[in-house]
Image (tube, grey):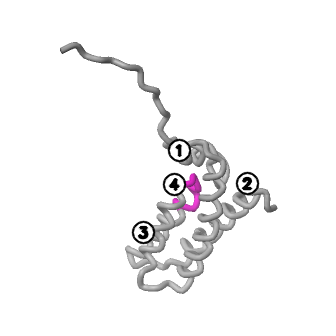
Amino acid sequence: MPLHLERVEWTQSPPLAPGDGPIDVDHLRRMTLGDPALEREVLAMFSTQSARILGELSALPPDAPTHAHTLKGSARAIGAFGVAEAAANLETALAGGLDPAQPLAALGAAIGEARSAIELILGRS
Protein backbone atom coordinates (compact mmCIF):
# COMPACT_ATOMS: atom_id res chain seq x y z
CA MET A 1 0.00 0.00 0.00
CA PRO A 2 1.55 3.37 -0.98
CA LEU A 3 2.07 6.03 1.66
CA HIS A 4 0.03 9.18 1.34
CA LEU A 5 1.98 12.29 2.26
CA GLU A 6 0.45 15.69 2.69
CA ARG A 7 1.76 19.03 3.80
CA VAL A 8 0.77 20.08 7.32
CA GLU A 9 0.92 23.71 8.38
CA TRP A 10 3.25 24.25 11.32
CA THR A 11 2.15 26.40 14.24
CA GLN A 12 4.69 28.05 16.50
CA SER A 13 4.57 27.08 20.17
CA PRO A 14 4.14 29.72 22.87
CA PRO A 15 7.39 31.43 23.83
CA LEU A 16 9.54 30.08 26.61
CA ALA A 17 10.19 33.62 27.78
CA PRO A 18 7.35 36.14 28.09
CA GLY A 19 7.18 39.27 25.96
CA ASP A 20 7.44 42.77 27.34
CA GLY A 21 4.58 44.20 29.33
CA PRO A 22 2.09 42.80 31.81
CA ILE A 23 0.18 41.00 29.03
CA ASP A 24 2.06 39.15 26.30
CA VAL A 25 -0.30 40.04 23.45
CA ASP A 26 1.40 37.70 20.98
CA HIS A 27 0.88 34.78 23.37
CA LEU A 28 -2.74 35.81 23.93
CA ARG A 29 -3.31 36.01 20.19
CA ARG A 30 -1.91 32.50 19.69
CA MET A 31 -3.98 31.08 22.55
CA THR A 32 -7.18 32.62 21.15
CA LEU A 33 -6.33 31.62 17.57
CA GLY A 34 -6.28 35.27 16.55
CA ASP A 35 -9.96 35.79 17.39
CA PRO A 36 -10.24 39.42 18.65
CA ALA A 37 -13.66 38.84 20.24
CA LEU A 38 -12.31 35.86 22.17
CA GLU A 39 -9.25 37.88 23.24
CA ARG A 40 -11.49 40.58 24.67
CA GLU A 41 -13.70 38.03 26.40
CA VAL A 42 -10.86 36.18 28.14
CA LEU A 43 -9.16 39.43 29.14
CA ALA A 44 -12.36 40.73 30.72
CA MET A 45 -12.91 37.41 32.50
CA PHE A 46 -9.32 37.36 33.78
CA SER A 47 -9.57 40.94 35.05
CA THR A 48 -12.69 40.09 37.05
CA GLN A 49 -11.35 36.72 38.23
CA SER A 50 -7.97 38.06 39.32
CA ALA A 51 -9.54 40.86 41.39
CA ARG A 52 -11.93 38.38 43.05
CA ILE A 53 -9.20 35.85 43.82
CA LEU A 54 -6.88 38.55 45.19
CA GLY A 55 -9.66 39.65 47.53
CA GLU A 56 -10.15 36.08 48.69
CA LEU A 57 -6.41 35.56 49.12
CA SER A 58 -6.06 38.67 51.28
CA ALA A 59 -7.97 36.83 54.03
CA LEU A 60 -5.57 33.85 53.69
CA PRO A 61 -8.29 31.17 53.75
CA PRO A 62 -7.31 27.51 54.22
CA ASP A 63 -7.67 26.95 50.46
CA ALA A 64 -5.38 29.89 49.57
CA PRO A 65 -2.82 27.62 47.83
CA THR A 66 -5.59 26.36 45.53
CA HIS A 67 -6.63 29.94 44.71
CA ALA A 68 -3.03 30.88 43.96
CA HIS A 69 -2.64 27.81 41.75
CA THR A 70 -5.84 28.61 39.83
CA LEU A 71 -4.72 32.18 39.27
CA LYS A 72 -1.30 31.00 38.10
CA GLY A 73 -2.86 28.81 35.41
CA SER A 74 -5.30 31.47 34.24
CA ALA A 75 -2.54 34.05 34.04
CA ARG A 76 -0.31 31.78 31.98
CA ALA A 77 -3.15 31.07 29.59
CA ILE A 78 -3.63 34.74 28.69
CA GLY A 79 0.03 35.74 28.76
CA ALA A 80 0.03 37.55 32.12
CA PHE A 81 3.34 35.97 33.03
CA GLY A 82 4.17 38.46 35.80
CA VAL A 83 0.92 37.51 37.57
CA ALA A 84 1.66 33.83 37.02
CA GLU A 85 5.12 34.15 38.55
CA ALA A 86 3.81 36.12 41.53
CA ALA A 87 1.02 33.57 42.07
CA ALA A 88 3.57 30.76 41.90
CA ASN A 89 5.72 32.53 44.51
CA LEU A 90 2.71 32.91 46.80
CA GLU A 91 1.75 29.27 46.26
CA THR A 92 5.29 28.20 47.20
CA ALA A 93 5.33 30.41 50.30
CA LEU A 94 1.98 29.07 51.47
CA ALA A 95 3.00 25.46 50.85
CA GLY A 96 6.25 26.00 52.75
CA GLY A 97 4.62 27.68 55.73
CA LEU A 98 6.50 30.92 55.02
CA ASP A 99 5.20 34.44 55.68
CA PRO A 100 2.92 35.20 52.72
CA ALA A 101 2.88 39.00 53.21
CA GLN A 102 5.55 39.89 50.63
CA PRO A 103 4.45 37.40 47.95
CA LEU A 104 0.83 38.52 48.43
CA ALA A 105 1.83 42.19 48.04
CA ALA A 106 3.83 41.33 44.91
CA LEU A 107 0.83 39.45 43.52
CA GLY A 108 -1.39 42.45 44.18
CA ALA A 109 1.03 44.72 42.32
CA ALA A 110 1.29 42.31 39.37
CA ILE A 111 -2.50 42.00 39.16
CA GLY A 112 -2.83 45.79 39.27
CA GLU A 113 -0.41 46.16 36.35
CA ALA A 114 -2.16 43.42 34.36
CA ARG A 115 -5.61 44.89 34.98
CA SER A 116 -4.40 48.35 33.91
CA ALA A 117 -3.00 46.85 30.71
CA ILE A 118 -6.24 44.98 30.11
CA GLU A 119 -8.25 48.18 30.52
CA LEU A 120 -6.04 49.83 27.89
CA ILE A 121 -6.38 46.86 25.55
CA LEU A 122 -10.14 46.85 25.97
CA GLY A 123 -10.27 50.61 25.39
CA ARG A 124 -11.70 51.48 28.78
CA SER A 125 -8.84 53.68 29.94
The residue tagged with tag 3: helix, strand or loop?
helix
Closer to the camera in the image, 5 or 11: 5
If you read the primary sequence from the N terminus, does the residue marked by circle 3 or circle 2 appear first? 3
Where residue 7 appears, as percent x and y from the top left, is: 41, 20
Residue placed at 66% from the left, 48% from the top?
36
Residue furthest front as drawn: 1
Measuring from the top left, give residue 106's x and y in whole percent: 60, 69
Q: Amino acid at mark 4?
A: Ala
Tell which tag, 4 or 3, sits nearer the viewer.
Answer: 4
Residue named by callout 1: 17
Q: In this picture, is 96 found above or below 122?
A: below
Counting residues from the start of the chain, the first of labels 4 and 3 encountered is 4
Q: Residue at x 55, y 43 (%)?
A: 33
Q: Which mark is residue 57?
A: none
Q: Main secondary structure of the magenta part?
A: helix
Task: Residue type at mark 3: give it.
Answer: Thr
Q: Which mark identifies residue 77? A: 4
* Residue 113 place in picture, x, y as percent: 69, 62
Label 2 or label 4, whichever comes before in sequence order: 4
Check if mark 1's residue and mark 3's residue have beta carbons within 8 Å. Answer: no
